[in-house]
């Protein structure tokens, strides 16, 4: 059963949150003839110099249903040992607030309050934002301390666009209830991809390269593959501005609608390959001395991951030739045992165990490999390696739905900084707020990730990069 409109789905995520808001700030809410609730507060992004807060405002209609309502917004902020001052005021009223404050000092604790029409924003009934010590529960955060040395490069990490998808949030058949875009609005995968590319055009988010770790399409149909390639090409050039590997949704398919595309084994046809790369081919790219390797971990059928022998052999050859070169690997399927045990679909959803062991063994012998970027789980999460290799295994939340965004990897001479960003166009913020209600309202606890999963610094020697 698919859903009606986004207003109703926003209701589902707001009902319990609004009740919590009234308890958290009873004076400001109950004093109003028509109560306003400022909910879903999230401290999404904290860099060395900035913070981004998001929240939603809702109010009851005459029947008592909670609906999004346009309001103003302000943020009061100051160092933890000083008084708060107003540092942000929203220019145009909206239900879906996105406040970015710049000019902060690295490594410094700050206190904050976010308000709409005088009502203080509070976090949702979410474990992620209400765990003890979280910025949302304490009203405090500490800016990151950047790695030492000069900044070198910025790489954007994204995945799971699902271009062509019509219903978001389905797992099996029509369950749980899915989410559709409102009639008359552009399809949500197009809205969300456009929002990512819009962000990356802006000077404060400009990246040297965009890496897309799979599931660019819903089912790799010819028109989906052509359309997503055209959308990306309107922003930049493949193999120069962006690199893409396929995910399980981009795999070769059976059926008459795929015939005419590149033939694949067992009577399959590969329409994705006509626009991007051949099946199970390793992508190789260099950026100022940084080596970027893209893995095709998709299988011919099914959602699990594997790496076939020719691709493994080429990867091993490259790593043996230059084991110490700083190397970032990206592929759709996560790799580690922890990822297999903690994702909602289980161990069969990630890279199969023999290939995972072989891959991590290669990394042990190539100390230059420092990060593997994966998608597929639609969540922000770091998982523990299964070997002694000093590699960060990072899963990045989906472009297509809540929290709806991408991560920036900023390289310095002495390490790197990771930050996750929600997309900020008005249409993207509306859809992201709507899809908070996926999986009966439990999606935020699974996909947002902890503050440290989204924002962290790793020290590493990159002094040889340009």
Image: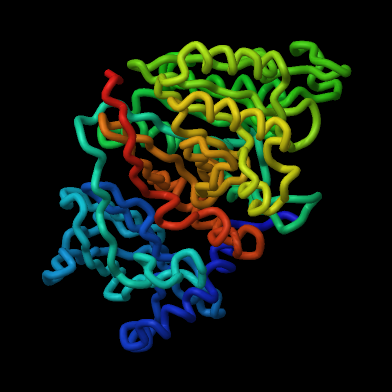
280 to the left or right of 371: right
Q: The C terminus lies in which quarter of the figure?
A: top left
| Outermost residue, right side | 266
Colouring chosen for the image of the structure? rainbow
Of 296 and 164, the residue lying toward us: 296
Residue 96's spot in the image, x, y percent? 40, 58
Residue 100's spot in the image, x, y percent? 27, 51
Q: Is residue 463 above or below residue 435?
A: above
Q: Which residue is found at the position 72% from the left and 50% from the top?
A: 345
Q: Is residue 234 above or below residue 190?
A: above
Q: Is residue 415 visible?
A: yes
Q: Is residue 158 visible?
A: no
| Outermost residue, left side | 82
Of 95 and 144, the residue lying toward us: 144
Residue 316's spot in the image, x, y percent? 59, 17
- Quadrant in the picture for residue 385: top right
**How many numbered markers are drawn?**
0
Residue 421's spot in the image, x, y percent? 39, 45
357 to the left or right of 143: right
Q: The N terminus lies in which quarter of the figure?
A: bottom right
331 to the left or right of 17: right
Of 368 and 30, the residue lying toward us: 368
Q: Which residue is found at the position 47% from the left and 76% from the top?
A: 18
Q: Which residue is found at the position 40% from the left and 61% from the top?
A: 42
Q: Which residue is found at the position 73% from the left and 36% from the top?
A: 352
- Quadrant in the picture for residue 315: top right
């Amino acid at each position: 059963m698919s859903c009606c409109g986004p207003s109703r789905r926003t209701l589902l995520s707001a009902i319990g949150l609004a009740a919590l808001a009234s308890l958290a700030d009873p004076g400001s809410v109950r004093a109003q003839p028509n109560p306003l609730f400022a909910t879903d507060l999230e401290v999404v992004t904290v860099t060395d110099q900035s913070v981004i807060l998001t929240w939603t405002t809702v109010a009851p209609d005459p029947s008592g249903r909670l609906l999004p309502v346009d309001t103003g917004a302000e943020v009061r902020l100051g160092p933890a040992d000083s008084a708060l001052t107003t540092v942000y005021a929203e220019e145009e009223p909206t239900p879906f607030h996105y406040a970015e404050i710049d000019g902060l000092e690295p490594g410094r604790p700050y206190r904050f309050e976010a308000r709409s029409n005088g009502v203080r924003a509070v976090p949702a009934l979410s474990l992620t934002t209400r765990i003890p010590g979280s910025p949302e529960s304490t009203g405090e955060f500490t800016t990151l301390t950047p790695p030492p040395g000069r900044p070198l490069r910025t790489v954007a990490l994204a995945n799971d666009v699902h271009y062509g998808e019509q219903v978001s949030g389905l797992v099996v058949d029509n369950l749980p209830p899915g989410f559709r875009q409102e009639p008359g609005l552009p399809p949500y995968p197009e809205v969300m991809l456009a929002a990512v590319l819009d962000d990356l055009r802006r000077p404060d988010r400009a990246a040297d390269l965009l890496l897309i770790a799979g599931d660019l399409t819903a089912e790799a149909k010819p028109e989906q593959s052509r359309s997503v390639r055209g959308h990306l090409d309107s922003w930049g050039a493949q193999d120069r501005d962006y690199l893409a590997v396929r995910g399980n949704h981009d795999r070769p398919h059976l059926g008459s609608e795929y015939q005419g595309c590149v033939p694949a084994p067992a009577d399959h046809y590969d329409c994705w390959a006509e626009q991007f790369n051949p099946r199970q081919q390793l992508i190789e790219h260099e950026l100022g001395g940084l080596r970027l390797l893209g893995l095709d971990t998709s299988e011919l059928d099914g959602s699990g991951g594997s790496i076939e022998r020719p691709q493994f052999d080429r990867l091993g050859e490259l790593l043996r030739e230059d084991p110490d070169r700083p190397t970032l690997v990206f592929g759709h399927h996560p790799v580690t045992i922890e990822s297999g045990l903690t994702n909602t679909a289980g161990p069969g959803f990630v890279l199969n165990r023999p290939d995972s062991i072989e891959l991590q063994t290669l990394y042990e012998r190539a100390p230059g490999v420092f990060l593997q970027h994966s998608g597929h789980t639609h969540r922000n999460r770091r998982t523990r390696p299964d070997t002694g290799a000093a590699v960060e295994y990072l899963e990045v939340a989906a472009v297509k739905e809540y929290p709806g965004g991408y991560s920036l990897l900023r390289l310095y001479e002495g390490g790197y900084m990771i930050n996750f960003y929600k997309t900020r166009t008005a249409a993207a913020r509306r859809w992201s707020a709507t899809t908070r209600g996926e999986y009966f309202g439990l999606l935020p606890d699974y996909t947002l990730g902890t503050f440290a999963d989204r924002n962290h610094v790793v020290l590493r020697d990159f002094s040889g990069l340009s």
